[in-house]
Amino acid sequence: MAKKIQAIRGMNDTLPEQTPVWQKLESLIRQTVSSYGYSEIRMPIVENTNLFKRSIGEVTDIVEKEMYTFDDRNGDSLTLRPEGTASCVRAGNEHGLLYNQERRMWYIGPMFRHERPQKGRYRQFHQVGIETFGMATPDIDAEVILLSARLWKALGIEQHVELQLNSLGSNQERNAYKEKLVEFLQAHEDQLDDDSKRRMLTNPLRVLDSKNEGVQALLENAPKLSDYFGDETAEHFAKVQAYLDAAGVKYVINERIVRGLDYYNRTVFEWVTSSLGSQGTICAGGRYDGLVEQLGGKATPAVGFAMGLERIILMLETLELNSDVKGDVDIYSILVGENTDVAGFKVAELVRDQLPHLKMMHHCGAGNFKKQMKRADKSGASVALIIGESELEDGTVTIKDLQGNSEQKTVAIDSLVQVLPAYFA
């Protein structure tokens, strides 16, 4: 017997019993982004490796440790995309979508990072991204945050997430701050762990994001980036907060948020939750005004975010918010007796023609009435349509309510499509 081939570690199947929850989430996302006027863009999964080295930064964990990179047959270095922003900017530059224009775009799809798989975090994972271009004012920063907040309300998890907000200032302000931060860290190098010592020399802002409790305690006395803000940056950040206040969105200022990617400036934010155990991030983003030019385009302001779908679905399961998610079947047709098969097919197609919003499963493969009823129950259908020999003779169909308390009724085939919608009201 041949050995079974299994999925690659950290790259999981989504089974038919699980997909209705994904479809619910994806549908709510599509409704929400559409309500803000955002247009969908679809980018390839494989990109030139230099795209991510130039955008994310060569001394980030993603580029150094986590990317799936390989040489193709032509010797070109290719990478499975670890995130979507760089791909979106590349596509915008390539197709002339960005310069001197305003764009609001979104995307959904798989990303790939070679990291240790754990609950809610996988090597192939799925993200939704929002990217906006051509708007430098703080109102668009607030809009993308409000869009995400609206999605949490639609999902019923708004009480289980917290918005954390920060500003990274301009490149000049940040560089001035880095010098002072490095001076502070070098003066206390004996209190740093090995990872922080390495980051101090390569990407010092990432030390602020350290998970080491001793390092975090040390940072309480470190210089603050906000002390280096000029008037323009301070006003921009204050205006973002004013918009959020006006919309009633609560937040906390967290000056340790620096994000793991090199391209951010000014506003950065994270939505975090404690509903999955230790505090974790389910959505993060911010402003990245220099990235378009960095990737070969004309200077263009930009702001966006990305959210991981696996962790949101895990939240919905943990909080038991999936009870309203229906399966793939609304109606199941059952055939009993001689010569009912052709009539059954005609009835099934009639329902599909006249009531296309309902999901109709027609029984195939023969079997007695008891066996067919078991399959109807297993399908999760709300209603069974039964065609027996008596119904065939009378030109009728029997409707059996599988979920509610309605009495079984027999109706003429000609009136079936008028009667059925009442069962799904």
Image (cartoon, grey):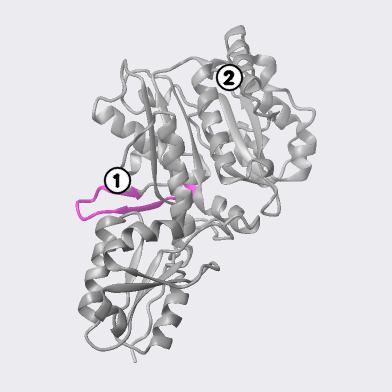
Left or right, 40 with reference to 8: left
Pick the quarter of the image with the N terminus.
bottom left
Farthest residue in the front direction? 394
Question: Which tag is nearer the camera, tag 2 or tag 1?
Answer: 1
Crowdedness near tag 2: few (<14), some (14–19) or many (≥20) residues, C-alpha within 10 Å: many
Between residue 347 and residue 142, name the one nearer to us: 347
Q: Position of residue 203 (x, y in %)?
A: 57, 34
Q: Is residue 329 visible?
A: no
Q: Position of residue 23 (x, y in %)?
A: 43, 54
The magenta stretch is: 64-79
- What's the amino acid at mark 2? Gly
Q: Quadrant of residue 299?
A: top left
Left or right, 87 with reference to 204: left
Judging from the image, what secondary structure is the residue with disc 1 in? Answer: loop
Between residue 77 and residue 33, name the one nearer to us: 33
Judging from the image, what secondary structure is the residue with disc 2 in? Answer: loop
Residue placed under numbered mark 2 in the picture: 169
**Disc on res. 44:** 1
Q: Is residue 142 visible?
A: yes
Give above or below for 383 relative to 2.
above
- What's the amino acid at mark 1? Pro
